[in-house]
């Protein structure tokens, strides 16, 4: 599986190996790849289609318990309650509010749950095992943002090329600046031709990135899981500390960027 350093090399490869090495360094490519990846992960994190979450079932017979470390990956995003023996509508589920653990006594008997401590523990406000089960959806975006070079990219494999090309396009101004300020004496008359080549790379990458951007928006806006879910609300998104990239608009209304 390619890691982040591999993808940084792919960013440099977008220039076909034709640029002088002093214009763009490997660290430039890795830094820009991580920044673009972080932004797109944030967009996935605030989308209402929950592309970055994974589900954990609470199989317990008590209100308090500890989640295994290998299951509790990321931040609890939202929780759902499934009724036993609901033959009429087996996919029926109800939202369970996530509240601070100190507020659990205030909601005695209500469908609430709290998460706290390390290893991660939970405390429910009702005897959920009497009539159903709880599913907790964890979001790994926070952990994915803290990446090192030898880690997997942690991004949708079908769209990693989008991140690579966006990072390469963002690096063109860096290369221009280095060419203007740090050109080598032997480059001399070649500087205008190198500058024109950078302009050509930028135009080509801009067209390719635009096509990838359209497909990525479709991906974020489409529910690949055919079963309905209780989507996270804007309040929950903000409560979990994500940046509101929508500027107050709907999370999917990105406009141009």
Image (cartoon, helix red, strand yellow):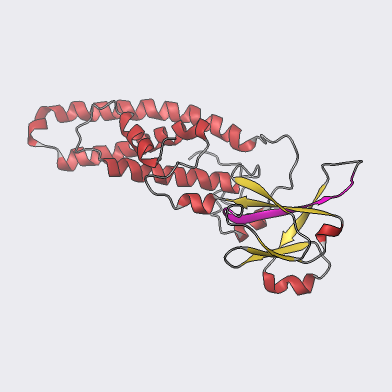
Q: Looking at the figure, which quarter contains the N terminus? A: top left
Q: Is 248 colored magenta in this rendering?
A: no
The residue shown at (66%, 57%) is: 235
Horizontally, residue 26 falls left or right of residue 216, namely left
The residue shown at (53%, 54%) is: 243
Does residue 51 show up?
Answer: yes
- Compared to residue 194, the image places residue 231 above or below, namely below
Horizontally, residue 126 falls left or right of residue 163, namely right
Does residue 250 show up?
Answer: no
x, y percent for residue 192: 18, 28
Total count of labels: 0
216 vs 182, nearest the viewer = 216
| Farthest-out residue, right | 88
The residue shown at (54%, 30%) is: 214
Main SS of the magenta part reads strand
Tell me the magenta residue range.
Answer: 73-86
Horizontally, residue 131 falls left or right of residue 41, namely right
The residue shown at (69%, 36%) is: 225
202 vs 103, nearest the viewer = 103
| Image-quadrant location for residue 4 | top left
48 vs 148, nearest the viewer = 148
x, y percent for residue 145: 47, 51
x, y percent for residue 20: 19, 32
């Amino acid at each position: 599986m390619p890691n982040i350093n591999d993808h940084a090399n792919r960013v440099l490869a977008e220039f076909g190996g034709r640029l002088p090495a002093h214009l763009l360094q490997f660290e430039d490519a890795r830094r820009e790849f991580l920044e673009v990846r972080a932004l797109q992960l944030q967009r996935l994190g605030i989308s209402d289609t929950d592309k970055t979450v994974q589900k954990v079932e609470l199989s317990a017979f008590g209100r308090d318990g500890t989640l295994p470390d290998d299951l509790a990956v990321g931040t609890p995003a939202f929780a759902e309650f499934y009724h036993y023996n609901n033959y009429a509508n087996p996919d029926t589920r109800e939202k369970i509010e996530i509240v601070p653990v100190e507020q659990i006594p205030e909601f005695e008997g209500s469908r609430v749950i709290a998460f706290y401590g390390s290893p991660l523990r939970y405390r429910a406000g009702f005897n959920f095992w009497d009539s159903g089960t709880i599913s907790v959806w964890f979001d790994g975006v926070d952990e994915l943002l803290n990446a090192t070079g030898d880690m997997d990219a942690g991004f949708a494999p079908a769209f990693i090329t989008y991140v690579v090309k966006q990072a390469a396009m963002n690096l063109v101004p860096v290369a221009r600046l280095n060419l203007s300020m740090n050109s080598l004496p032997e480059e001399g008359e070649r500087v205008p031709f190198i500058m024109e080549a950078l302009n050509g790379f930028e135009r080509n990458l801009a067209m390719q990135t635009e096509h990838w951007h359209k497909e990525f928006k479709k991906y974020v806006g489409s529910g690949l899981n055919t079963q309905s879910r209780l989507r996270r609300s804007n309040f929950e998104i903000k409560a979990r500390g994500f940046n509101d990239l929508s500027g107050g608009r709907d999370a999917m209304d990105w406009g141009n960027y």
